[in-house]
Image: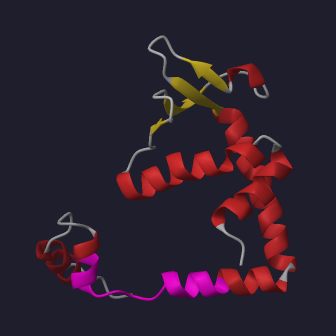
Amino acid sequence: MASMKESIVTYMTGANSRYKYLSGILIGMYRHGLTHEWQPRDIKLSNGTVLRWRVIRAEPKDIRLLIVRDRDGTLLLNMVLTELLHDLSVAIKAYLSDLHNNVELRATADEVMNKLNRPISQADFQRKCRGYVDNATFDYILANVISS
């Protein structure tokens, strides 16, 4: 089974070769930051410089804008929004094609989806949400069920 980084390298590199080098940074800053902290992470490099993710509007494929130094010394990893969306579209199409044609990949995807679709208990859910969801939320859901 391919790791998330390997999958991103495989599919995103098909859209733009620079993802071969940036995929780990993007996973760490953006995916893990959003998933676990609700915002992309900044990274303090070993020399003390801060690297920050930023989405910008610019001409696609303007590689000069990829990594720039801000006035305060922060390095900005600029992602051109239209280019990022295009690259994601190309990568998703390639992944979907492989998903339909590669039995092993399909089995792995099915296994992951089955794990994600297993229900967890209300108590476990509340523990994972760290107080964002209380019993009143579930009482409301149960009181407002509409039968189909």
Image quarter hosting the N terminus: bottom right
Residue 111 in the image, given as x and y percentages of width and height: 62, 87
Confirm whether the magenta stretch covers residue 125.
yes
Image quadrant in which you'd find residue 126: bottom left
Residue 34 in the image, given as x and y percentages of width and height: 44, 52
Residue 81 in the image, given as x and y percentages of width and height: 64, 34
Image quadrant in which you'd find residue 130: bottom left
In magenta, the rendered stretch is: 110-126
Nearer to me, 107 or 44: 44
Determine whether 99 is above or below 67 in the image: below
Looking at the image, residue 14 sits to the left or right of residue 66; the answer is right
Of all residues, the one furthest to the top in this rendering is: 71
Confirm whether the magenta stretch covers residue 42.
no
Image quarter hosting the C terminus: bottom left
Q: Residue at x 67, y 80 (%)?
A: 109
Residue 67 in the image, given as x and y percentages of width and height: 64, 25
Determine whether 17 is above or below 130 in the image: above
Number of marks in the rendered image: 0
Determine whether 9 is above or below 101 in the image: above
Determine whether 68 is above or below 148 in the image: above
Looking at the image, residue 104 sits to the left or right of residue 137; the answer is right
Of all residues, the one furthest to the front in this rendering is: 47
Nearer to me, 13 or 46: 46
Q: Residue at x 43, y 58 (%)?
A: 35
Majority secondary structure of magenta residues: helix
